[in-house]
Amino acid sequence: YNTSLPRERVVRLTKMVLVLVAVFLVSVGPYHVLQLVNLSVPRPSLAYHTCYYLSVCLSYAASSINPFIYILLSGHFRHRLVCRDTPSMPSVERENQAPRSSF
């Protein structure tokens, strides 16, 4: 814990790390459970093979979900999403104005 970082930033980073770890555990957990089941089952059934392939796909999906988690949990993205710059005059009025010369 660094005392020079603001508390709000530390809380936000901690929340981001916890969400990333939770998503990782949820996506990779079924694969490892099925590997343990495979040790006790002499002949896996079609349902096992289907669940196995789905768990592999789910574990690969975790790596593609991570960038979106970073984007959604970052404060800068949320700030830009909420506080977008609004133009001072409507775009129709700006298009109708004659361009000003620099002379």
Image (tube, rainbow, N blue to C red):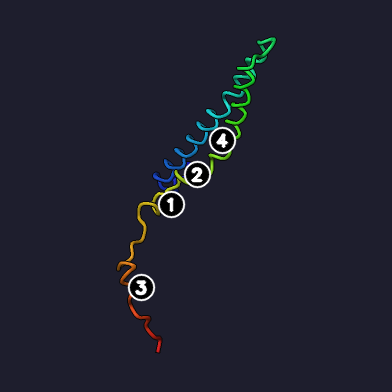
Which label sits on residue 70?
A: 2
SS under mark 1: helix
Mark 3 Cα-neighbour bin, 10 Å: few <14, some 14–19, many ≥20: few
Q: Which mark is residue 76?
A: 1
Give the mark nearest the N terminus, 4 or 3.
4
Q: Residue at x 42, y 40 (%)?
A: 11
Q: Are marks 1 and 4 in contact (CB under 8 Å)?
A: no
Q: Nearer the viewer, residue 15 or 89?
A: 89
4 or 3: mark nearer the eye: 3
Of helix, strand and loop, which one carries label 4?
helix
| Mark-to-mark CA distance, 4 and 3 | 46 Å
Q: Secondary structure at mark 2?
A: helix
Quadrant housing residue 28:
top right
> In front of the other: label 3 or label 2?
3
Q: Secondary structure at mark 3?
A: helix
> Which residue position is annotated with label 3?
95
Q: Amino acid at mark 1?
A: His
For marks 2 and 4 on the same chain, the one whose residue lies earlier in the sequence = 4
Which residue is labeled 4 in the image? 62
Q: Are marks 3 and 2 in contact (CB under 8 Å)?
A: no
Indicate the amino acid at tag 2: Tyr
Mark 1 or mark 3, whichever is nearer to me: 3
Q: Position of residue 17 (x, y in %)?
A: 50, 38
Task: Residue at 51% x, 36% y: name it.
Answer: 20
Foreground of the two, 16 or 78:
78
Density class for disc 1 (Cα within 10 Å; few <14, some 14-19, many ≥20) is few
| Residue drawn where x is 61% and y is 34% of the image | 60
Q: CA distance from mark 1 to mark 4?
A: 23 Å
Type of amino acid under label 4: Ala
